[in-house]
Image (tube, helix red, strand yellow):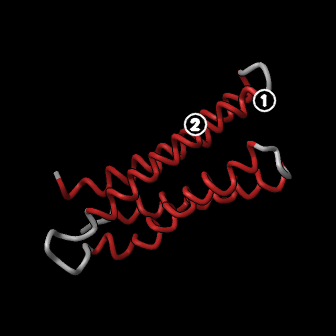
């Protein structure tokens, strides 16, 4: 059971990013009466997604090596840069980019930066999922 936990966490991370970014948020802008209302709800969903990312990444880091050992599991050695990169992107997006979007400060630029960071984070999660589901 414990050997499957990395793949489960990576799947939760990638799946939640995919669901929020590619399904839920676009549907908000289609079905809510105003873009402002949809944008406010999207901001709340992206904030919640940040904490899902933080939880998954921190847990992946905590289980990356056997208890009492110095060496990491092979999956962790291969995925470490993507786990840390995705975690940092999520935090930077939440606390650096999102406040500028909410304040409508240079909206087009910050929205493009945030979207790009979300895409790179999605790729980090996908690569982590690919690595953790590989043959051992």
Identify the mark at residue 76; answer none if there is no mark: none
Tell me the residue at 42%/63% (across/down): 128
User: Is 127 on the left or on the right of 95, as rendered?
Assistant: left
- Residue that lies at the very extreme toward the top in this rendered image: 33
Residue 116 placed where, x, y %?
Answer: 69, 58
* Residue receiving disc 2: 45
* Residue receiving disc 1: 36
Q: Do the residues under discs 2 and 1 have CB atoms within 8 angstroms?
A: no
Tell me the residue at 33%/60% (across/down): 60
Callout 2: helix, strand or loop? helix
Vertical placement of residue 46 versus 88, above or below? above
Residue 127 placed where, x, y %?
Answer: 47, 63
Residue 21 placed where, x, y %?
Answer: 61, 43
Mark 2 crowdedness (10 Å alpha carbons): few <14, some 14-19, many ≥20: some
Distance from disc 2 to disc 1, alpha carbons, whole Å, reads 14 Å
Quarter of the image where the C terminus is located: bottom left
Residue 97 placed where, x, y %?
Answer: 69, 54
């Amino acid at each position: 059971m414990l050997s499957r936990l990395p793949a489960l966490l990576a799947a939760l991370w990638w799946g939640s990013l995919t669901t929020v970014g590619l399904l839920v948020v676009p549907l908000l802008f289609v079905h809510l009466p105003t873009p402002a209302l949809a944008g406010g709800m999207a901001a709340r969903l992206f904030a919640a997604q940040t904490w899902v990312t933080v939880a998954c990444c921190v847990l992946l880091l905590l289980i990356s090596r056997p208890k009492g050992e110095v060496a990491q599991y092979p999956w962790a050695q291969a995925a470490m840069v993507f786990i840390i990169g995705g975690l940092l992107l999520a935090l930077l997006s939440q606390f650096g980019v999102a406040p500028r979007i909410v304040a409508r400060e240079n909206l087009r630029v910050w929205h493009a930066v945030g979207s790009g960071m979300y895409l790179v984070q999605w790729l980090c999660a996908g690569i982590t999922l690919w690595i953790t589901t590989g043959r051992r």
